[in-house]
Image: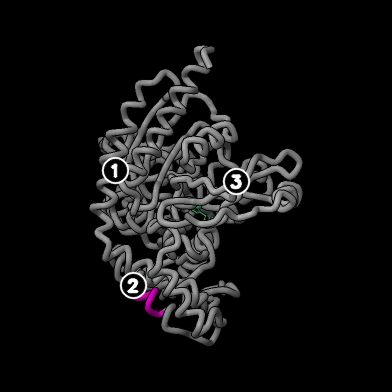
Amino acid sequence: MQKESSFNESLLHFDRDHIWHPYTSLTNPLPTYPIVSAQGVRLRLANGKELIDGMSSWWTAIHGYNVPELNLAAKDQLEKMAHVMFGGITHEPAIRLCQKLAEITPNGLEKVFLADSGSVSVEVAMKMAIQYQHAKGQSQKNKFMTIRNGYHGDTTGAMSVCDPEGGMHHLFSEFLPKHFFVDQPKKRFEESYEEKELANLEQFFRLNADKCAAFILEPIVQGAGGMWFYSPDFLQKIRKLCDEHDMLLIADEIATGFGRTGKLFACEHAGVTPDIMCVGKALTGGYMTLAATLTKQHVAETICNGEAGVFMHGPTFMGNPLACAIANKSLELLLNSGWLERVKAIERQLKKELIPIANSLSVKDVRVLGAIGVVEMKEPIDVPKAQKFFVEKGVWIRPFRNLIYIMPPYIIDEKDLNQTTSAISSFIISSHLCLLGMY
Ligand code: PMP
C-alpha cells in the first residue's frame, strides 16, 4: 500500500475557484475528486481510497495506468530529446509511428499528418477535404455533410459538424459555418437496412452534394453525441454515395480506434475504407496528447498539385518525439497483447451483466459493443450524485445526460469488471427506489 498523500485543502479551494475543468462552471462548480496516482486499472484518491476505472480516462488508457513498458519508452526518449520542431527536421519516433499507422489502418491510408489532439486532427481532415476539392477546380464544394447527434471535438471547425441542436455547441450556431445534417441512423448495430429504407439518403446527396467536400462521421459508434451504435449498412451506403457524388469520406476513429469496438478500427465492421481517417485518444495509451490524420495517395497528390502546392497546416508540437515514442510502444503492446480476445471477453461479460438491467423501469435501453457498455436511462442523471454513489462503491464512472457508460482498460479482469457493472446495477436499483419514493 502506498502512503496516503497529504492533499492540501487550499489546493482544492484554488481548483474550485480558478480552474476550469471540462464543461464546468466557475461560479457553481461541481465536486472534483483529487487523484494522486494510478496503477493498473485503479485510480488512487488523495484520501487513499482506490477506484476501479471504468472510463479509461475518456477512451485513452487501454493498457491501464503506470505501465512499465510505456514508462520506460518515455524515459528512454526523454534522455534523447523531449521535443524538436518538425519543420525541416525529422526523427525516428515519428517515422516509425507513421509507418505503423499506415500498416494497420485500412488499405490505402498511407499519408500521415501528426496532429496534437483529436479536435486538431478533425480540423486537419476538414482542411484536407477543402484543399482537395479546391485543387480539383471545385471550390464550390466547401461544406460538409454529417450525421445528427455526432461529436467531433471542441475547436471551431469540429464544432460546426457536431450536432447543431442537441449537441454541446448550439450556443455558437450563429458563429459557426452551416453544414448539412442527415438523420441519425435508427437501426442498431445488429440490424440491417433494406436498400429502399436508405433511399432518402440518395435524395439528400442529390440535393446537396454539389456544395459538399466530404461526409464526416464517427463510424458505427456515435460517442459524446449519445453513445449510439448503428448499422454497418448505413456506413456502406454513405461510402457508396460519396463515391457517386465526388465527395470524400472522413472517418473520425478518435474514440473507436485501436480495438475498442472489437475491430482494430470501427470502419472494418462495414468493410469500408474512408478517404481520410482521424485517430487519437488511445494512440499513446493515454500517456500524452497525440493524434493523426491519414489519407490516400490520390488525395495527397491532388492537394499538393493544387494552388497552394502544400498542405496548409503545421502545429508547433507536431510530431512531438516523446508522444511518438510512447505511441510506438503502446501500439506494440496492443498488437502483441491478444487485444481481440480481451475485448471479446469484456464484451461477453458486459452483455451478461448489463443487459438484464434493461428490465428496470428507469432504464430506456442497454447496449454493448466491444469493450463499451451503455445504459441509457429514461431521465437525465444527477451527475454529482451518481459520481458520489460510484465513488462510494469503489468505481470511477462519469455519466452524462441520461447515459451511464463504461469503456474500461482492456486489462481489466473479470472481478474488477463485475464490481463496475454491479455498481451500475446498484445505482439503477437506488434510482428505481427513488422513483417509487422509497429512498
Ligand atoms: N472526435 C471524437 C469522436 C471524440 O470522441 C473526441 C473527443 N471526445 C474528439 C473528436 C476530440 O478529441 P480531443 O478531445 O482530443 O480534441
Q: Secondary structure at mark 2?
A: helix
The percent coordinates of residue 107 (x first, y second) are 28, 66
Residue 427 is one of the magenta-drawn residues: no
Give the magenta range. 95-99
Q: CA distance from mark 2 to mark 3?
A: 37 Å
Percent position of residue 396, x then y: 48, 43
Q: Which disc is residue 33 wearing?
A: 3
Q: Secondary structure at mark 3?
A: loop
Picture coordinates of residue 391, whole percent (x, y): 52, 39
Q: Nearer the viewer, residue 36 or 193?
A: 36
Residue at x 41%, y 62% (from the top left corner): 276
Foreground: 197 or 138? 197
Sequence-first disc among 2 and 1:
2
Q: Quickly name the residue at label 2.
A: 100
The kind of residue tagged 3 is Tyr
142 versus 269 height, above or below: below
Q: Residue at x 42, y 83 (%)?
A: 92
Mark 2 or mark 3: which comes first in sequence?
3
- Mark 3 lies within 8 Å of ligand 1 (Cβ measured): no
Q: Is residue 136 visible?
A: yes
Element under disc 1: helix
Q: Say whether residue 262 is left or right of residue 148.
A: left
- Mark 2 residue crowding within 10 angstroms, few (<14) / some (14–19) / many (20+): some
Residue 198 visible, this angle: no
Which residue: 47% across, 74% down?
Answer: 74
- Residue bearing mark 1: 347
Q: Residue furthest top?
A: 437
Is residue 107 placed above or below 270 in the rendered structure? below
Q: Position of residue 170 (x, y in %)?
A: 62, 41
> Within 10 Å of the Cα at label 3, are there few (<14), some (14-19), or many (20+) other Cα atoms?
some
